[in-house]
Amino acid sequence: MILVESSPVHPGSNLGHNHSQMKKIKIWLPILALLVMGLLMVDSVKDDTVTTDENLMVGVGDLILKEQTFKVGFEPPPLMRDLVALPLLFMNLEPASHFIDNVVRQNVSDFAFYFGENFIYGQKNVPPEKILLAARVPAILLTLFLGYLLFSFCSKFYDSKTAFLALAFFISSPFFLAHGRLTTMDVPSAFFVLLCLWTLIRLLNTMTWKNAGLLGLTLAGALLTKHSMTTLLPFLIVAYFVHGFLFERALKKYGQNFLVVFAVSLTTVYLFYLYHLWNYPMSEQIADMKQTLQSTRSSIAAQMNWIVQLAHWPITRPLAHYFYGLFWQLLRPGAFGYFMGEGSMTSWLTYYPVGFFAKNPLPFLILFLAASGLAAKWLWAQTKTTALTSRSWLQQHFVDVLLLSWVLYFAFVLIFLNSGNTGSRYLIPLLPAVFILVSRTLTRAMNLLPKKILPVAGWTLAALLVLQFSSV
């Protein structure tokens, strides 16, 4: 048997030059594509009027960041509103507190929207369109960061083909092109979900306190972005300890690192809220909680009284404010929605599945269904040799199973546990994982095709991608 060694690649050889060129393409092509996406988003939104949620985000963001008080709109977490308000620090704006009407403010919850509108359109020195564009820039940048994070995730755990295909789905997605331009919390939630999954995998691969701290920080970022991201907690806990079982790791070490994750996350959330409560008097915070509960949540006022009591103690005030917003959302009776000719305060089981298929472009849906069929076929074939629940199979496909589990878990929460249907944008936190799984399946299928069929499949995929880009 003769072993033939490959000759070394010299810096001056054509092979070395081609490798260098490919490396540059992998670095700069995704950046260029995302820059084009960003320019299109800025151009399409620069003259758009304010949306309902942006009324709340912009004015309240300026108030809580500059003046460190939750006097207005205090239910949602503050992180995204802080980011939205950062560019406003460099504008000659009147203080947000000047637009607080103490009479109208008696209805604290509803007043936040009127306050935000007055803040944007009542400024004397800066036109409203300039304020809105400046506030939307951080949201657009975070969308682009999510795109690069998606590309990097695929490059790290799969290959460049999967990465480029997933990025193509992302930059041509109506969900991200539309909602990524606005100062809402759904795209930032998707960013922190994917970052949490990556830092979780990093911790599971290398059990160190540093990696545990990174996961704690990213989890805190998710919790500070949107209250619905508390759904990450049970998912991460189960995934964390299932991994320990699969790889037969020491439970004690897993427990210690989990405590670090929890401590870092809790401390970060606590300090973040402490900053924003600094100029918010305790008596006013308690009065606002009681007034809001009595006027808009009287049915759950008794259940949330323990949170109001927490606000009486200086050391627990930040936690009281976080829990107040969290349980405000968890215990809400519903939100009015209109779907298939019906209006309701409750949810429909078909709302989000229909939203997924109605809002995604047809070319992507074709590829999604094709990938789903291929994956089902492979999994069925796999069961004839190895059980899908076997330790060896799960170890080998842990990242795939983690992503698929997140998609199924979050979809289950939306469809069966969500109290109201308020928009298909709530699907956004699971879409990056969907893009990755579809791309992974399609590139694997392409690699398995015979050489005679490969060009036909490649041109078909290219045609569908061109059709998708042209449709948005």
Image: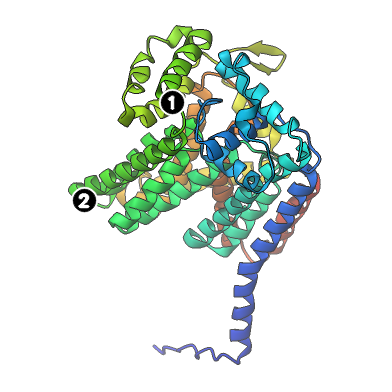
What label does residue 281 carry, if any? 1
The front one of 218 and 120 is 120
Q: Secondary structure at mark 1?
A: loop
Percent coordinates x, y for residue 92 in the rendering: 69, 44
Q: Position of residue 93 (x, y in %)?
A: 68, 40
Quadrant housing residue 306: top left
Q: Amino acid at mark 1?
A: Pro
User: Could you say whether the residue bearing mark 2 is in a helix, strand or loop?
Assistant: helix
Quarter location, residue 449: bottom right
Q: Residue at x 49, y 16 (%)?
A: 332
In the image, is residue 348 above or below residue 153? above
Name the residue located 56 percent from the left edge and 18 percent from the top edge.
109
Q: Does residue 66 sit above or below 465 in this rendering?
A: above
Q: CA distance from mark 1 to mark 2?
A: 43 Å
- Relative image position of residue 437 (x, y in whole percent): 54, 48
Residue behind mark 2: 253
Q: In the picture, which quadrant includes the C terminus?
A: top right
